[in-house]
Image (cartoon, rainbow, N blue to C red):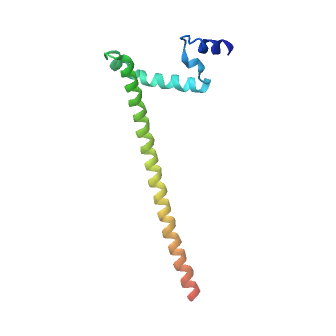
């Protein structure tokens, strides 16, 4: 750890990922493996680093759309369940009201 701090202070170039927590470094490496499928595209770009960033943005967008789709589905299911509960509550209320009159 002491050596890492000294490298940071002296602005030595090293693997910046070593300053991440182990969990974050693992998450980043997993993500980098995911975007490696775009390697053919960004290796042929005139600005490779920029193309890598756009590839990462594209992958994040795909994940975001997938999550949104799942969230929408869950919301639809919950709304359907709540609608049925409201109908059942109204039917129960009508039943109790009719029993009170009886």
Picture quarter with the C terminus: bottom right
Image position, residue 49 (x, y; %): 39, 18
Residue 53, position as x, y percentages in the image: 40, 24
Furthest-bottom residue in this view: 102
**The furthest residue to the right:** 2
Q: Quadrant of the N terminus?
A: top right
Q: Image point 48% across, 26% down: which residue?
A: 31
Q: Nearer the viewer, residue 10 or 47?
A: 10
Query: Residue 82, how many percent across, how many down?
Result: 50, 62
**Quadrant of the rendered image containing residue 55:** top left
Quadrant assignment, res 19:
top right
Residue at the (36%, 17%) spot, across then down = 48
- Asked whether 28 or 14 is in front, the reply is 14
From this view, report whether residue 34 is shown above or below residue 101.
Answer: above
Residue drawn at (43%, 32%) of the image: 60
Q: Quadrant of residue 18?
A: top right
Is 50 situated above or below 79?
above
Residue 78 x, y percent position in the rendering: 49, 56
Vertical relation: 93 (above or below) 22: below
């Amino acid at each position: 750890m002491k050596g890492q701090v000294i490298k940071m202070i002296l602005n030595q170039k090293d693997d910046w990922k070593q300053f991440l927590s182990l969990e974050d470094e693992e998450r980043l490496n997993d993500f980098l493996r995911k975007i490696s499928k775009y390697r053919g595209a960004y290796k042929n770009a005139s600005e490779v680093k920029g193309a890598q960033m756009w590839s990462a943005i594209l992958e994040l967008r795909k994940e975001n759309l997938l999550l949104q789709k799942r969230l929408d589905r869950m919301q639809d299911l919950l709304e359907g369940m709540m609608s049925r509960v409201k109908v059942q509550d109204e039917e129960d209320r009508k039943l109790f009201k009719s029993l009170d009159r009886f």
